[in-house]
Image (tube, rainbow, N blue to C red):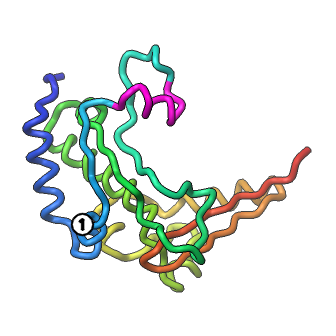
Amino acid sequence: MPSPSYETFDQLLEEILGELPPEIRSLLDEVPLVVENEPSPAVRGEFGIPLDEPESDLCGGHWGIPLNERSVFEPGFAPERIMLFRGPIWRLGGGKLKSVRKQILITLLHELGHHFGMTEEELSNLFTRFYRAKNDLTAKTRGTGLGLYLTKFFVEAHSGTVRVVSETGKGSAFTISLPLG
């Protein structure tokens, strides 16, 4: 695999940012986007990645109110900052520009996706098999619409519950409860 070209990475990132829909771009105007070569030891520690591993596959992260502490009744759902890591994204993309570009987009949309919230229609269909919301964010990402369906299926198979609280434009908070014993 060719060694990372950070100049090329930054050019790809700029292209992607220019192609984002206005509502996604407006969120990025409010949130600092930090790009580093590799996750620092402090970041690796925060994410539970052993420091003795030579390379991390952590492509990005967001900092702010943790998902398990969020409520749509409190303001401040935008993250404090979003970080992307050039090295892991380059490695996962195999050094091929098309794949690296796709990995940048996936990572960026994943980190931003925690902060959009859902409409009533999206909420009512959220756990339906093969359902995918139709918006600019999902149009740029691949998926089958099975993830949340299967999550609910397996949680309920263990006598648990899955709950979601969401507000369009502010964010979503998911809670999974499982009985002990």
Quadrant of the frame with the C terminus: top right
Q: Secondary structure at mark 1?
A: helix
Residue 150 among magenta residues: no
Relative horizontal placement of residue 9, taking residue 46 as reference (left or right): left
Q: Position of residue 83 (x, y in %)?
A: 32, 46
Kindly indicate the quadrant of the structure image that contains residue 161. Answer: bottom right
From the top left corner, tell me how far across and down residue 14 is, in percent.
Answer: 12, 53
Residue hosting label 1: 29
Three-letter code, disc 1: Asp
Residue lying at 16% horizontally and 50% vertically, measured from the top left: 13
Q: Which residues are magenta?
A: 39-49
Most distant residue in the right direction = 181
Q: Percent x, y for residue 94?
A: 23, 31
Q: Nearer the viewer, residue 84 or 128?
A: 84
Which quadrant, please, contains the N terminus? Answer: top left
82 relative to 47 in the view: left or right: left
